[in-house]
Image: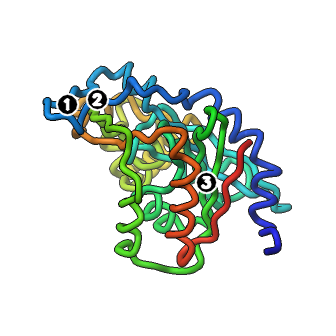
Amino acid sequence: MAPNPLFEQVFEELGPEFKKLIERKVGKYDPALDTGEDSDDEPEEMLDTWDIERYLGEVGAPICADEKGRLHLGDVSEPCVGAGCRISKKCKVGRKVGSFHTHPLVGVWPSPQDISTSAYENETFFCIGGRLVDDKPYAACYIPKGPFYMDPFHPLFSFSEEPEGHIRFWRESPPPEAEDLLEIMSDGDLAREYGDEFEVEGETDEERGAKIRQLIEESGDMPDGFFENYESEGEMDTLELYSPSQGERLMDEAFRRLAMFFKTEGRYL
């Protein structure tokens, strides 16, 4: 089978950046992380924020294409965990064509949330990085073959091998980011809500709000006033813990199950 030119470009232009993020953020396999969900005892729960970020934290970034089609990573978002990982929709240079994020445990097959988010964002492709055999950095990329529904993907996550164990932890939903706020608030709303904080001039709320919008876009920071009434949310979540010896076998199995819907390729970096 002839090499896919997009995969060749991705791994050539982005492979070194993928590797750096994986080596910096994805820890090596630690069987002691198993919190015992398969035992008869009540499983232990990872609740400490520091432990969760250290062992389960993810990083993510948009994949951007410049005017000549060359690929680069946009701003990296971290820490984020599980389905709460939010990747910027914007690129400072060029346009967003895809995304990259890490998985903290063995296996870089996509979750249902990974698939649905990529489809919702109309990405050309997305990539996931982690560690497999001998804790070596590994990345896999997925190119959709066409539109699809989510239901066909549910069988993917019933693998032929049982996980070594499970990790149960508190997954706190991250607060909205500046670009999320700007999407849902009009200029007038921004002026009425944050006018005192920014103290910009203008004859109408819309004029003042437009200036506030520009300041938020330039800084990328949320207004301080947003956090005065913000209450974080979250829920208990469970991740499956597979051993490195299972990693390559299950990646091959995931690729086979996704073949009807995705072009796939994975490489050690």
Residue at 58% of width from left, 59% of height from top? 252
| The quarter of the displayed image where residue 10 is located | bottom right
| Mark 3 / mark 2, whichever is N-terminal | 2
Residue 29: give x, y in percent of width and height.
51, 30
Q: CA distance from mark 1 to mark 3?
A: 32 Å
Residue at 43% of width from left, 32% of height from top? 56
Residue at 63% of width from left, 65% of height from top? 264
Against 189, is 157 above or below? below
- Quarter of the image where the C terminus is located: top right
Single out the mark in the foreground, 3 or 2: 2
Q: CA distance from mark 3 to mark 2?
A: 28 Å
Task: Give the residue type that dot 3 points to.
Answer: Cys
Observer-nearest residue: 8 or 220? 8
Task: Give the residue type that dot 1 points to.
Answer: Pro
Secondary element under disc 1, as helix, strand or loop, is loop
Secondary element under disc 2, as helix, strand or loop, is loop
| The quarter of the displayed image where residue 268 is located | top right
Observer-nearest residue: 57 or 246? 246
Q: CA distance from mark 1 to mark 2?
A: 6 Å
Residue 261: give x, y in percent of width and height.
53, 76
Q: Which residue is mark 1?
A: 43
Q: Which mark is residue 127?
A: 3
Secondary element under disc 3, as helix, strand or loop, is strand
Classify 10 Å Cα crowding around label 2: few (below 14), some (14-19), many (20 and above): many
Against 112, is 177 above or below? above
- Quarter of the image where the N terminus is located: bottom right
In screen coordinates, is 9 left or right of 24?
right
Residue 248: give x, y in percent of width and height.
58, 50
Residue 17: give x, y in percent of width and height.
73, 39
Q: Which mark is residue 35?
A: 2
Mark 3 vs 2: CB contact within 8 A: no
